Image (spheres, helix red, strand yellow):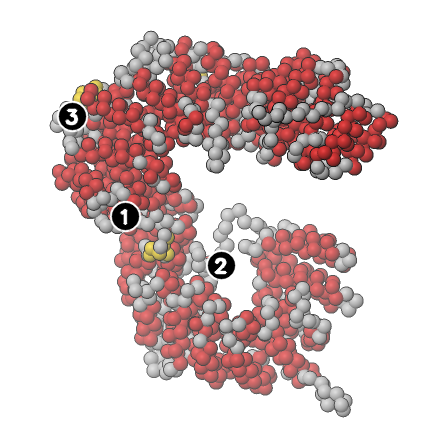
Amino acid sequence: MAVGEELAADAPEDGPEDGALACGGALESFGDSAETRALLGRLRALLGDRAAREGALERFRVIMDKYQEQPHLLDPHLEWMMNLLLGIVQDQTSPAELVHLAFKFLYIITKVRGYKTFLRLFPHEVADVQPVLDMFAHQNPRDHETWETRYMLLLWLSVACLIPFDFSRLDGNLGTQPGQTRVSIMDRILQIAESYLVVSDKARDAAAVLVSKFVTRPDVKEKKMAGFLDWSLCTLARSSFQTIEGVITMDGMLQALAQIFKHGKREDCLPYAATVLQSLDACRLPDSSQTLLRKLGVKLVQRLGLTFLKPRVATWRYQRGCRSLAANLQLCAQSLREPRTHAETPDSEEGYDVPEEVESVIEQLLVGLKDKDTIVRWSAAKGIGRVAGRLPRELADDVLGSVLDCFSFQETDNAWHGGCLALAELGRRGLLLPSRLADVVAVILKALTYEEKRGACSVGANVRDAACYVCWAFARAYEPQELQPFVSEISSALLIATVFDRNVNCRKAASAAFQENVGRQGTFPHGIDILTMADYFAVGNRSNCFLVISKFIAGFPEYTQPMIHHLVTMKVNHWDGVIRELSAKALHNLVQLAPAYSATHVFPQLLAMTRSPDLHTRHGAVLACAEVAHSLRGLAVRECSAEDRSTHRPAGRCACSSVCLKEQPVADFLDETAMQGLKQIHQQLYDHHLYRGLGGELMRQAVCVLIEKLSVSKMPFRGDAVLEGWQWLINDTLRNLHLISSHSREQIKDAAISALAALCSEYYTKEPGQPDPAGQESLVKQYLAELRSPEEMTRCGFSLALGALPGFLLKGKLRQVLAGLRAVAHVSPEDVSFAESRRDALKAIARVCRTVGVSAEGAPDEVVCRENVAQIYCTLLDGLSDYTTNSRGDVGAWVRKAAMTSLMDLTLLLGRDQPELIEASVCERVMCCLAQQASEKIDRFRAHAAHVFLTLLHAAGPAGPIIPHVPHREELEKLFPRSDVASVNWNASSQAFPRITQLLGLPAYRYHVLLGLAVSVGGLTESTVRHSTQSLFAYVSGLQNDRGALEDFAGTLLRVFEDNLLNDRVSVPLLRTLDQMLANGCFDAFTTDADHPFCEKLLALCKEEIKRSKDVQKLRSSVAVFCGLVQFPGSVRKKVLLQLLLLLCHPFPLIRKTTASQVYETVLTYSDVVGADALDEVMAVLGGTAWDAELPLIRGQRNRLCDLLGVPRPQLVPKPAAR
């Protein structure tokens, strides 16, 4: 729960069971004691090493933080830890830095375990007071590095000052030495406390604890209490919460006062209470923006209220007897059979005089319940509970009435939240009598569904969470018979919150409250069964709650109608669109459990809501109408089928009529009025222009869902005019997709396509499977015409629409449809950026193929056959070469993914039905292209390609593999066994590349895999580059002893380069790949041959690639390749050096500098490039020339290098004179 349980010390009804620890997988003991002892034992050795000291401190923090949730495990070890650290502190020889370090460790322990448990372990003998006071003399309150020391010393002093002796006995004779003034110990302690109450660090909190313990001592209160209170009130009055200094000072004063009135005796504090209350009122803390000050103000007010009232246990309070869960479960049934009535004891102190100040206290606490911050409201709620426990019954009832006033819809969510917390406090303290339960339960049920819309979101989650806390508290506070009249309402409300609340914390809180009630009360219907399904962890998933758990719970009759009612009244009109959609789907499940109620009560209400002026209500109602109608249809079919089986009639026929399954069943639940209401939804929205604007987007999507569900439900609308309206809406939506906001475009497009498929399948036939010729002609012709639209989104929509058409509408039109989709999928100069339309066209082609089926000798206008299958494959394979990029990045990847999926669908379809249509060349091209995609750089598309590749490889039927002509099938099945398919994460480059590079050993795949790897190895993503490079180098290293294989590999690499010349997508990363391969000795075997063909061909390709290029990245990569080629002997080396020297005079200064730097490194690396006599001079020229200077100045230096390296000087070619 958002609000943690805090058990107050003055709540006598809480038994020992409340403190039981219930957590799974928790730690069992302090398992780090040995490491901790060693760490604390070597603190002295760490003193001189700052890094080691900070490391030890951090390690200790890590150890302690593990026990933050179970600090009690430290208790057996606290004493020895404290003794080790205090031994350092009390050692007079310990340097100051070591003392401060020890206190830092002490503070870390205190932070985890809490100072209250820690206090009793401090030495607190009389002899300890003076040493602690002396330590304060060496402290600097402004030193922010050692605040832990001062904090711990103040805590130590707060327990040491509790010695049972008058402090005057420790002072001795203060006046024995004339001329010297000694301050008494009492004054010294008070001065220390006062000085640290106004500091800005945590020592202020410890000073407040010290004050509360010291000032309330019997000997101190007589002499110092009045003076201290006067000083603190004066300081408080002089401070302002408008300044930082004022806030710090007021914080210290308020903490000190609150602690004094908490720990001091009532008779000692009562004389000052009224004065403190007046001073507090004058501070106007509720107007402060500082949350902590307002919280301390509420805390002080409640302590003052408790001071005004005599401490007593209210005799009129409700007391529950047995608190044991086991006993409660055993006696539950007996308790219900023999109800016990709570004897309300008359108040024996009705004449008790309540001071007037109490009214002011309660008023301020009620105001605190409405504060904007939770911690203030929580403190106020506890104060209400504590104060009400000391009031007479009538006054306490008035307080309860004031709390109930918080639950007005004129109040803010803060007031509702504070009211819930206060009711929980009153209930668990027994101050909320059973006679008021009816009023309280009514407001709690409202709070469980409280939600107020604020702009684009809502508030109220904290209110619902606190309402669950109230129900949880009531389960522990009342006997089962007291809550019995409200069990039905509370259980339904809690379960509704458990499964239908938008906020996961509220769902978990409701589940915990329901579980507590099942265990404590034992009267919640089907509680154990429900808890096994809807436990604390199961409700974490929202979709699971709405669609699975809710259906299980609604199976119990007690909860069915309340859940349906809640969905209709509270969730169908919710501000969050996801909740509206989930609610509609949940209604689909639930109405089947109460069909009569849904048809007579729910459906008319939903139809009325479709006419609401509120957009969210209208949208949710249309979705709900669609789901409810579809659900009732399914229920009717099942009922009819069950009747058929029971009377042994053939399936699909019943006694009423031969078309029962199409028309009659839905009418059994929905009357003519409901049918007319469904038909009118579209026309009403159209007449009121509600399909326009942003609201129109939601309504288009909702009505498309309605069309789909009504069509699937086989509503008797054949031939009705409403069909034309529905068709217009679908067409208009697809035509104007470009006007719809991008974030909802895909959802609306999918809804329209689904609606079109269902509408055509149900209503566009004259006889089953026979189209209406006129309708078919006009629809297909219209959709084909829209494919030529200049709007990309329009092409997307109508491409998918053609793919969604049923088979009878495509009959005789297949050739036209495929030609139209092929035109959309083709990349042309004018629509090169239309990647999304190409993606959807490829998806549509595959769907059309699945719809019409396969027949080898069939007509090409009706089925996929021998005549058209090659063209279909060609279109899909062309999609794999779409590498279009724009401002959004590699948008061609969408097309490639769609092409891969479509190829898989088509190939599997052919393999199952007509495998002879798959030609060997086509299959080889498909598998090779998939292997290329599986070796490229984008993780998710690489993984998708691998999935498709392995699906086709392992596709099998009863007779074995169904995909024929897969190249190297046996080798592939060994490399990629079926058992490893699920275990390999192809998204992870560390797992993908070591496997995909093994395909380089298969000649059919080598070219394509190498093409993909070149892009990955020369890419930019660090992990992809690292793992692809390692895998490639590992493969090539295995070829070093096989000269023939290495020659084949090098030849394939050159063919990849040659085929992709001037294709920057491939050539630039390929140059980087070649650079790395040359630098890592992948082709060292060729260095033994002078003028090896590989080197000659690579040099020629590099020269061709950079000719007239102005791409800096390409030029720099080519320089690196040229430098790598220098290692090869023969005339090729002279040619390479000539190219490098040409680049030394490139127009770009950056290229000149890069070339000089890399040539310098190359000359150092390959010593045989330059003769020993010329080496020093070459190095001096390369290293000493400013290569970014003007070209005429550096050309001489370049020519000098030519002479030294034995390369002919380049000659300037004069530009042709202009005529």
Q: CA distance from mark 1 to mark 3?
A: 38 Å
Residue 919 image position (x, y, % from top left): 44, 10
Q: How many residues crowd around disc 3 within 10 Å: few (fewer than 14), some, or many (20 or more)?
A: few
Q: Which residue occupies the foreground of this view, 827 or 16?
A: 827
Which label is found at residue 659? 3
Q: Amino acid at mark 2?
A: Gly
Q: Is residue 24 visible?
A: yes
Residue 1217 image position (x, y, % from top left): 61, 25
Q: In the image, is residue 741 above or below residue 162?
A: above
Q: Amino acid at mark 1?
A: Leu
Q: Which residue occupies the foreground of this view, 928 or 38?
A: 928
Q: Mark 1 = which residue?
A: 615
Q: Mark 2 = which residue?
A: 19
Q: CA distance from mark 2 to mark 1?
A: 50 Å
Left/right placement of residue 921 relative to residue 337 reads right
- SS under mark 3: loop
Is disc 3 in contact with disc 2, using a CB cutoff of under 8 Å?
no
